[in-house]
Image: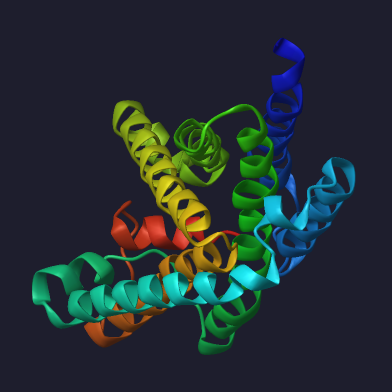
């Protein structure tokens, strides 16, 4: 019985070691983490050899994936528009971290996030890991287990060294909040993958959350007419979760 769970356990550990220990130590130069993540996922695919069904890449399910993904894309996009139009919500986005130039923002939104974050993470978690989990667990437990691993994957990006020095307790709470939020997002992404039968659905949802979120933050900061603050907040979280460049 234990040996049945070994591929799932080893893959989970390998993903966490990569995401929490290796990636944060890579050079910060643009594109390095994106390239590294794509290469790591290529190795993961070569080692585990999942079927197209397990990856959610069956052609006959692509239409369903696009429909579900498009729905979520529209809902998330509408939510960010509302956040930009409603003053209190606009202020939450305005208190953002990061003030990239337009070129840097476009590079992150059009290249680094779609490839290094969305494609890499969806292939790894809603593709390979969820496929392995479904071999030994039912759909609900498989979704929960892989989503917990997905949340823990974000431990490194959730940590803010300056905040930890100033208030360790507050920093720990913030880290737990980010891990819980990303685990919750993982549950939604897993549901979309299972419901649609296609990886395209969580890819679209993930892209909407990260890329549109970063664009909303940039619009809020620039329209607010003041520099970004250094305190952790909604904008900072959105920026941190788009760490792939």
Image quarter of the N terminus: top right
Q: How is the image coloured?
A: rainbow
Whether residue 227 is visible to the viewer of this picture, yes or no, is: no
Residue at point 49%, 56% (across, down): 241
Query: Residue 205's x, y, as percent?
Result: 45, 66
Residue at coordinates 57% horizontally, 40% vertically from top-left?
Answer: 153
Taking the view exactly as shown, the residue that stands out farthest to the front is 60
* Quarter of the rendering containing residue 227: bottom left
* Residue 57 occupies quadrant: bottom right
From the viewer's perspective, tell me whether residue 36 is left or right of residue 2. right
Q: Which percent across, then down, holds residue 152?
A: 52, 35
Looking at the figure, which quarter contains the C terminus? bottom right
Q: Where is residue 8 drawn, in percent x and y?
A: 69, 29
Q: Nearer the viewer, residue 130 or 21?
A: 130
202 with respect to 9 (left or right)? left
Residue displayed at 38% across by 44% down: 184
At 59% from the left and 50% from the top, the residue drawn is: 126
Q: Is residue 50 above or below residue 241?
A: above
């Amino acid at each position: 019985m234990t040996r049945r769970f070994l591929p799932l356990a080893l893959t989970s550990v390998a993903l966490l070691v990569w995401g929490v220990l290796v990636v944060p130590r890579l050079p910060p130069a643009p594109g390095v983490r994106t390239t590294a993540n794509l290469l790591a996922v290529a190795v993961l695919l070569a080692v585990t050899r999942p079927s197209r069904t397990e990856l959610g890449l069956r052609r006959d399910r692509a239409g369903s994936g696009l429909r579900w993904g498009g729905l979520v894309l529209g809902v998330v996009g509408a939510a960010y528009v509302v956040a930009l139009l409603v003053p209190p919500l606009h202020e939450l986005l305005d208190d953002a971290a990061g003030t990239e130039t337009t070129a840097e923002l476009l590079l992150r939104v059009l290249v680094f996030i779609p490839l290094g974050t969305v494609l890499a993470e969806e292939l790894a978690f809603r593709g390979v890991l969820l496929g392995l989990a479904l071999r030994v667990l039912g759909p609900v437990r498989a979704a929960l287990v892989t989503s917990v691993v997905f949340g823990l994957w974000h431990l490194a990006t959730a940590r803010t060294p300056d905040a930890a020095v100033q208030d360790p307790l507050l920093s720990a709470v913030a880290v737990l909040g980010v891990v819980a939020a990303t685990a919750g997002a993982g549950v939604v992404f897993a549901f979309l993958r299972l419901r649609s039968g296609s990886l395209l659905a969580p890819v679209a949802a993930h892209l909407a959350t990260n890329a549109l979120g970063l664009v909303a933050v940039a619009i809020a900061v620039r329209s607010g007419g003041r520099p970004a603050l250094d305190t952790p907040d909604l904008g900072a979280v959105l920026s941190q979760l788009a760490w792939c460049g």
